[in-house]
Image: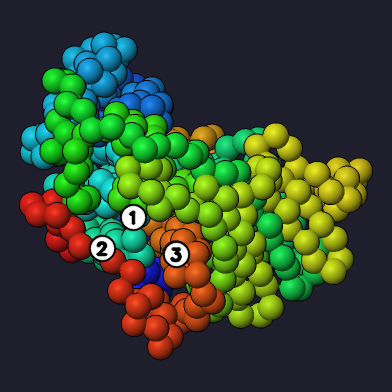
């Protein structure tokens, strides 16, 4: 059932109709919001998960709204974040108490991956718009769940795949060039994202007093505390993450799918090899990997652990892009012509749906005002991270898999289908 891609198209269609009619989309504000961008009209925001990347997202939100609260199961993280905010930023260690506040309009979610969906769903049902760090989901079924709740609540939901907005528009330009046909009709995208970390075995120790280890584990299987399971290193454990395949893989694979015009569908065949450490109490995600995804129309995406780059190749040309630059003969040809440069700039504006391009968090705040679909919407991100999850499943099972992108299920493979979801530890199950 393609509820997510259909709802994305329906959203864009209905938004266009509303705009054309000059009618404001209905929305009940919970505070004095956005008549202007002065300090008294800015929305109230809160940050959930404020270590590492979550702290950075929270600070960016604080620059655009009134940061009134933050939450982290590590109380030191919450206290450190609040100390850097001008004004009165309350601290919490239980996000549910933060969500009970009626004066908060929007939240950022920057927790480890296994908490993203539950917190985001609870936040939307509490009436908050959400900016959630990528990768959004731990499983493909979580993606289906959160798409349903975004549609159900009508909340603005931005995912933190910021390459869609930032890096001097390099990725937007790469997408526009690829979609124009200049590279050819059947394209191959190399999504190369580097290796995961390796390590272990690690020792079980007593959790520090500032960390609620029970809450940190959430839906994941209960285990003894190891410092190496927490903070930045959570991403090297399958219990909490998909490793480098989803953590960095979703950045370039998201752009690849958009560039190849596949952002509302998925592959039909997936195969790959990965190296896993199966020793107890060690990092257990794929350290190195090489996966191939085949799509209808002859397109391919190869997700691999080489140097960081996205290379898109067709029978007419090739371009290479990463956060350091955009190169290739087609890029040089466009740069040499004012007419072609103007064309490319115009295509970038169209890709961004004529919203202003002023940063990923700014796009989220702009869409809170306008009620438009953000540039990194939940529906296309679900497709992007699902492709990465499929790569992991193919590597774990060590065989080629056949996928039905319309039904979002494997074809004739009960074992693979069982890996679309995971058993969740009570009371941290996701209700959607």
Looking at the image, which is closer to me, 1 or 364? 1
Quarter of the figure that contains the C terminus: bottom left
Callout 2–callout 1 Cβ contact below 8 Å: yes
Which of the two labelled residues, at mark 2 and mark 3, occupies the earlier sequence position? 3
Residue 217: image location, x then y, percent? 20, 42
Q: How crowded is mark 1: few (under 14 residues within 10 Å), some or many (20 or more)?
A: many
Q: Which mark is residue 422?
A: 2
Q: Can residue 91 be seen in this view?
A: no
**Residue 326: image x %, image y %?**
75, 42
Q: First in sequence: mark 3 or mark 1? A: 1
List x then y, in percent, for residue 125. Answer: 16, 52
Towards the viewer: 432 or 245 = 245
Indicate which disc residue 396 carries.
3
> Residue drawn 78% across and 61% down?
313
Q: Residue at x 26, y 11 (%)?
A: 83
Secondary structure under the numbered disc 1 in the rendered image: loop
Relative to the observer, which residue lies in front, 342 or 275? Answer: 275
Write the residue at 76% across / 73% down.
185
């Amino acid at each position: 059932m393609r509820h997510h891609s259909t709802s994305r198209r329906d959203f864009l269609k209905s938004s266009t109709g509303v705009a054309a009619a000059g009618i404001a989309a209905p929305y009940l504000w919970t505070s004095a919001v956005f008549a202007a961008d002065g300090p008294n009209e800015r929305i109230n925001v809160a940050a959930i998960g404020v270590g590492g990347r979550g702290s950075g997202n929270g600070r960016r939100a604080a620059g655009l709204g009134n940061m009134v609260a933050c939450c982290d199961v590590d109380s030191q993280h919450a206290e450190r974040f609040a100390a850097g905010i001008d004004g009165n930023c309350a601290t919490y260690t239980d996000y549910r108490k933060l969500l009970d506040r009626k004066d908060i309009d929007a939240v950022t979610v920057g927790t480890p991956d296994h908490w993203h969906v539950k917190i985001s769903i609870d936040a939307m049902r509490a009436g908050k718009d959400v900016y959630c760090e990528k990768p959004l989901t731990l499983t493909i079924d979580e993606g289906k769940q959160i798409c349903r709740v975004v549609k159900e609540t009508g909340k603005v939901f931005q995912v933190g795949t910021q390459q869609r907005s930032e890096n001097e528009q390099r990725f937007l330009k790469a997408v526009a060039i690829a979609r124009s046909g200049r590279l050819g009709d059947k394209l191959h995208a190399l999504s190369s994202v580097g290796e995961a970390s390796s390590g272990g075995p690690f020792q079980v120790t007593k959790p520090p007093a500032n960390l609620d280890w029970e809450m940190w584990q959430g839906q994941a299987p209960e285990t003894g505390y190891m410092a190496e399971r927490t903070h930045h290193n959570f991403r090297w454990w399958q219990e909490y993450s998909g490793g480098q395949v989803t953590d960095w893989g979703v950045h370039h694979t998201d752009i690849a799918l958009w560039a190849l015009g596949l952002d509302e569908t998925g592959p039909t065949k997936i195969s790959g090899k990965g190296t896993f450490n199966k020793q107890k109490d060690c990092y257990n995600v794929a350290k190195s990997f090489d996966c191939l995804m085949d799509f209808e129309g002859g397109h391919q995406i190869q997700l691999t652990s080489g140097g960081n780059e996205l290379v898109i190749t067709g029978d007419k040309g090739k371009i290479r892009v990463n956060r350091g630059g955009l190169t290739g003969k087609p890029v040089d040809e466009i740069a040499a012509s004012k007419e072609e440069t103007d064309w490319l700039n115009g295509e970038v504006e169209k890709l961004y749906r004529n919203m202003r391009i002023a940063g990923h968090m700014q796009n989220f705040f702009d869409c809170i005002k306008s009620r438009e679909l953000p540039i990194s919407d939940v529906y296309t991100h679900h497709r992007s991270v699902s492709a990465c999850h499929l790569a992991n499943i193919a590597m774990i099972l060590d065989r080629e898999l056949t996928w039905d992108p319309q039904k979002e299920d494997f074809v004739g493979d009960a074992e693979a289908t069982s890996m679309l979801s995971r058993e969740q530890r009570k009371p941290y199950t996701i209700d959607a």
